[in-house]
Image (cartoon, rainbow, N blue to C red):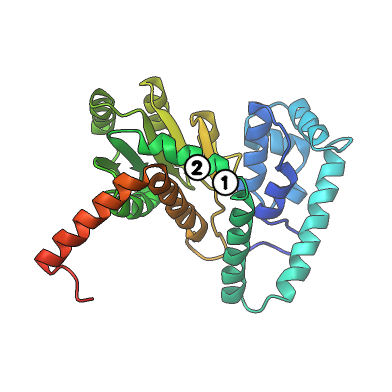
């Protein structure tokens, strides 16, 4: 839960939307999002230290966002924080606010999906990869498994990579040798180091990496050719992944739409098999 006067991560992301940032500036933006509760009170020197950049870089970052310097950006952050505090006062108790925040995350995702052609292109890219590697480590592992469970009903070879370690790179190499051309990766906070290393390995191996991640300034942007952001809820003790899971199913729909005849044939074959084996009660 944000402190009074602290801008929420979503408010911060709205500031960066549509602004072309350099890699260094993306690091600063990501740092501010991660420290959203304190961002409005940090000095330029403190932001520079947290982000691992120079203090002039922080000043240039503020100017890239349309401010005449970092103090003006900090005032803007405090204004946004005051607005968030007022909204929270009207939003009910802490549990209700967490659910309302997820609704807002879904609204933002819906707005992003106005560009249906981009999602359709992602669907064609992933549908054409045989096999299709799906990466999700630690907190992202359940999302990778959920996506893969349904994707396997319409795609002939879905391979879930949900364990790290030295074997992960071996499995990536095997997928590439078998004909994989793209990989779908779930990259969620707290961003496991192994996940980012796997993205780099996949790209170096020639795979086109599509990343579902929490923000357009996520560390995944350093290695993924296609980044699909969906905000993560951070108002409870553990993160809520409502929007990323929804986006995963949207991507799967795009895969189905990319090969409708094959999708229909595979679904009918599964239903026939399920009926023969009496898998379901209904």
The disc placed on residue 212 is: none
Given contact means CB atoms under 8 Å apart, are the residues at marks 1 and 2 in contact?
yes
Q: In this view, does 272 lie above or below 120?
A: below
From where the camera sits, is residue 195 visible? no
According to the picture, the residue beneath numbered tag 2 turns out to be: 120
Q: Is residue 106 left or right of residue 247?
A: right
C-alpha span from label 1 to label 2: 6 Å
Residue 94, image x, y percentages? 60, 74
Report the residue that reaches farthest toward the left: 277
| Figure quadrant of the N terminus | bottom right
Numbered disc 2: secondary structure: helix
Report the residue that reaches farthest toward the front: 261
Q: In this view, does 253 lie to the left or right of 102?
A: left
Numbered disc 1: secondary structure: helix
Nearer-the-camera pick, 49 or 130: 130
The residue positioned 29% from the left and 29% from the top of the image is 172
Q: Quadrant of residue 269?
A: bottom left
According to the picture, the residue beneath numbered tag 1 turns out to be: 116
Q: Residues within 10 Å of mark 2 (few under 14, many from 20)?
A: some
Nearer-the-camera pick, 93 or 266: 266
Report the residue that reaches farthest toward the right: 68
Residue 230, image x, y percentages? 55, 51
Residue 56, image x, y percentages? 78, 26
The residue positioned 79% from the left and 29% from the top of the image is 60
From where the camera sits, is residue 101 visible? yes
| Figure quadrant of the C terminus | bottom left
């Amino acid at each position: 839960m944000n402190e009074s006067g602290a801008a929420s991560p979503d408010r911060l992301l709205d500031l960066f939307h549509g602004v072309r940032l350099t890699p260094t500036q993306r690091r600063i933006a990501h740092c501010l999002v991660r420290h959203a509760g304190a961002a409005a009170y940090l000095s330029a020197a403190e932001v520079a230290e947290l982000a691992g950049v120079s203090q002039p870089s922080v000043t240039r970052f503020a100017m890239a966002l349309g401010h005449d310097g970092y103090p003006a950006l900090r005032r803007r952050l405090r204004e946004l924080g005051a607005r968030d505090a007022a909204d929270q006062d009207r939003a009910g108790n802490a549990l209700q606010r967490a659910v309302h925040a997820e609704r807002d995350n879904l609204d933002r995702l819906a707005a992003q999906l106005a560009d249906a052609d981009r999602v359709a292109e992602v669907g064609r890219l992933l549908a054409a990869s045989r096999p299709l590697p799906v990466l999700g480590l630690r907190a992202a592992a359940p999302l990778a498994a959920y996506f893969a469970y349904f994707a396997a009903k319409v795609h002939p070879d879905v391979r879930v990579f949900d364990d790290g370690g030295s074997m992960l790179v071996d499995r990536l190499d095997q997928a590439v040798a078998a004909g994989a051309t793209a990989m779908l990766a779930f990259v969620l906070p707290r961003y496991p180091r192994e996940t980012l290393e796997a993205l780099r390995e996949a790209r170096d191996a020639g795979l086109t990496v599509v990343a579902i991640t929490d923000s357009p300034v996520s560390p995944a942007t350093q290695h993924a050719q296609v980044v699909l952001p969906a905000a993560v809820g951070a108002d409870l003790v553990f993160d809520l992944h409502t929007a990323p899971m929804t986006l995963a199913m949207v991507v799967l729909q795009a895969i189905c739409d990319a090969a409708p005849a094959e999708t229909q044939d595979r679904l009918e074959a599964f239903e026939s098999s399920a009926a023969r084996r009496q898998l379901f009660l209904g």
